[in-house]
Structures are given as structure tokens and as C-alpha cells.
Image (cartoon, rainbow, N blue to C red):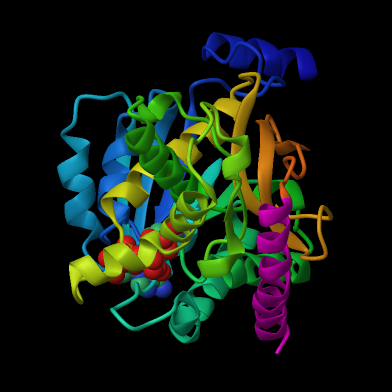
Amino acid sequence: MFKQVTKQLALQGVRNFSCSKQNNYKVTVCGAAGGIGQPLSLLLKQNPLVSDLALYDIVHTPGVAADLSHIDTQSKTAGFIGAEQLGDSLKGSDVVVIPAGVPRKPGMTRDDLFNVNAGIIRDISNSIAKNCPKALVAIITNPVNTCVPIAAEILKKAGVYDPKRLFGVSTLDVVRARAFIGHALGVDPQQVQIPVIGGHSGVTILPVLSQSQPQFKGNQDAIEKLTVRIQEAGTEVVKAKAGAGSATLSMAYAGARFAGSLLKGLNGEKNVIECSYVQSNITEATFFSTPLVLGKNGLQENLGLPKLNDYEKKLLEAAIPELKKNIQKGIDFANA
Ligand SMILES: NC(=O)c1ccc[n+]([C@@H]2O[C@H](COP(=O)([O-])OP(=O)(O)OC[C@H]3O[C@@H](n4cnc5c(N)ncnc54)[C@H](O)[C@@H]3O)[C@@H](O)[C@H]2O)c1
Ligand SMILES: O=C(O)C[C@H](O)C(=O)O
């Protein structure tokens, strides 16, 4: 019987169905019609590892999908609209990227988004648990520090939580640090390597400037100014957009880079390293971003805390209580 099935699959061109697939991944974007979702989907449409791009939102996805489907890359694009189509958008997905939810306006903190966005993450997580429990899930929605623990609790309740498969996307903090350091040093930002650890809001964002390669040259005052600029870069964009939302294009770039790294890991590429906010025992905060090696099952190895100088140790001390508070809020919400 087994032989027969193998022969049949071989005839259909399925050469080795017991091995993981290659260059053939389904990615679902939840919130695909939004300010981040559209350019993120555009970038994912150009990723050769993607074979199926599913665009889910509560509005506009048929149009966004029709538009993207005319791009001459191999992936198939399909739009899914409304809660009743969420499950279909997720079925068979290898990677789910979530930028669904409201963005900040000037004067708001990321935590102010909790009341609306927590429920969105809960509902999408419930559907992930039913429809693609093995997918790698990347949460962009703010407050990231709280939304990731919410998703973890929901997946736990459904009995499908795997901490190696759930990620908070903090890539934009790394992208910004590379941009600011590159421009300050007069070098190509693409050549800058810097870990940004902790969480994704204010004091929880901890750029480890002492570990920057090339080295950031500046006195303590310059280091502190750059640290605060990286921590407050999201607010800089919110203010500049003056009520029209928060970072979308740079976030789409960062989200596509992170999703691309997840796909490279799935595809067996070695030494894929990204900082991301995951369940962690590296500090007292049970979710924390550090550099991670990504592999065939998501998080392959947590590389832990980079070496910190005294100033960075103080930043870490300030970040932990805030992170713990943010995490507990998510756990309480999911279990209420
Ligand atoms: N992690 C980061 O670094 C980072 C960076 C920038 C923005 N963000 C966050 O990303 C989120 C989205 O930002 P944006 O600028 O794209 O906002 P946006 O308002 O432009 O788009 C959000 C999209 O989500 C959709 N949506 C709302 N409820 C939904 C639901 N229940 N299911 C599916 N889709 C739903 C909306 O229809 C909209 O298309 C915000 O929470 C923002 O704070 C995070
Ligand atoms: O600042 C925001 O509200 C959006 C995002 O978290 C960012 O860092 O740009």
C-alpha cells in the first residue's frame, strides 16, 4: 500500500513527500490591506521562497490581491475578506505575519492600542490554532510586548503552543539602529551589525551600541542621544505623520526581512540570525528579544544576551519591570 502511494506521488511529480518542502511556502498576511500590510505583501510577492501569498483583512483584500496577482513572480496571490474567510486564509500556511490592528496617533503610547488590538490578536491566534497550528507566527501588531504573550496563552489553551514558533517582530528597531549608525559613521548601513534586545516600546528597546560593528564612535553623550533616538524612533514617525498613522514603509521593509529570514530558516539555510521578541529565560522577563538562530522549526538557538557595558546594564534594569508589566497584562487578558 505504502509503495503504491509512493509510486502514485512520484508520477504526480512529488519526489520525496517525507522531506520538508523547498521554495514552496505559503505565507498569510493578516491585516494585508493596511498601511503596513500592502507594501509588506508587495515585498513578499517578490520573495522566491513564497509559492502562495494569502492576503487577509476585514476590508479591501480582493482588490489588493487582484492588483498584486498581476506581478510577474511565481507566487499565487489570493484575497480573503471578513472573519468568515480567516480560516481559509490560514489553512496550510507555513508563515503567518500579522500587522492587523490600529496604529498610534500623536500623544498615544503603544499600550494605548491594547484595548482594540488585544482582541484582534486573540481572534487571529484562535484561528491559527485551528487552521495552521505548526505555522511560524510573526506579530507586528502593537503593543508587541503584550500581543505576543496574548498569542502564546491562546495557543497554549488550544494545546498547540510551541515557543519556537511564535515571534514578536522587533526588526524595525535593528533596521533603524543600522540606518542611524551607518549615516553617523558615513558607512553603508547594510554593513552595520548591531543587536537590539529587550522589547518593542520606549525604555524596553535596548540598542547594544557597545557591540556595534563597525564600532560606534562617540562620547557618552552621543551614545545616550543615539540610544534615545532609537528608542523613540517610532514616536518620531508618528509625530511627523501628524495623525496619519505610524511607520508603514520602513515596517514593511523590516517585516519582509524578518519573514524572509523565517523562510530561509525553514528552507534549511544556515546561520540565519535575527533579533526577535520570544519566550525567553535569559532575563526575568518571560518574553525578551535577543539574537536568535532561525532554522527548520523556527527558533533553533537563542544566542542570549550580548556583552553589555555598565550603561547598557542600567538600561536593562529599566527595561525589565516595564516588560514584566506588559507581559502580565497580556497573560491576564487571555485568561480573563
Ligand atoms: N512591530 C513594529 O515594529 C510596528 C511598526 C509599525 C507599526 N506597528 C503596528 O502595526 C499595526 C498596523 O499598523 P498599520 O499602520 O498597518 O495600520 P493600518 O490601520 O494602516 O492597517 C491595519 C489593517 O488592519 C486591518 N484590521 C483591523 N482589524 C482587523 C482584524 N480583526 N483582522 C484583520 N485585519 C484587521 C485594518 O482593516 C487595516 O487594513 C499597528 O498596531 C501598529 O502599531 C508595529
Ligand atoms: O511607533 C509606533 O507606534 C509604531 C511602531 O511600533 C514603530 O516603532 O514605528
The image quadrant where one finds the C terminus is bottom right
Quadrant of ligand 1: it is bottom left
Up-down: is 243 above or below 129? below
Up-down: is 192 above or below 332? above
The image quadrant where one finds the N terminus is top right
Identify the residue shown where x is 69% and y is 79%. Answer: 325
Find residue 131 and report its horizontal and vertical position in percent: 59, 56
Q: Does the magenta stretch include residue 177?
A: no
Count every numbered label the image shows and give the total: 0
- Residue 185 appears in which quarter of the rendering? top left
Q: In this view, does 305 lie to the left or right of 136?
A: right
Find residue 261 and report its horizontal and vertical position in percent: 53, 32
**Furthest-bottom residue in this view:** 336
Identify the residue shown where x is 75% and y is 58%. Answer: 161
Q: What secondary structure predominates along the stretch shown in magenta?
A: helix
- Residue 62 appears in which quarter of the rendering? bottom left
Find residue 252 and report its horizontal and vertical position in percent: 34, 48
| Range of residues picked out in magenta | 310-336
Q: Is residue 235 left or right of residue 316?
A: left
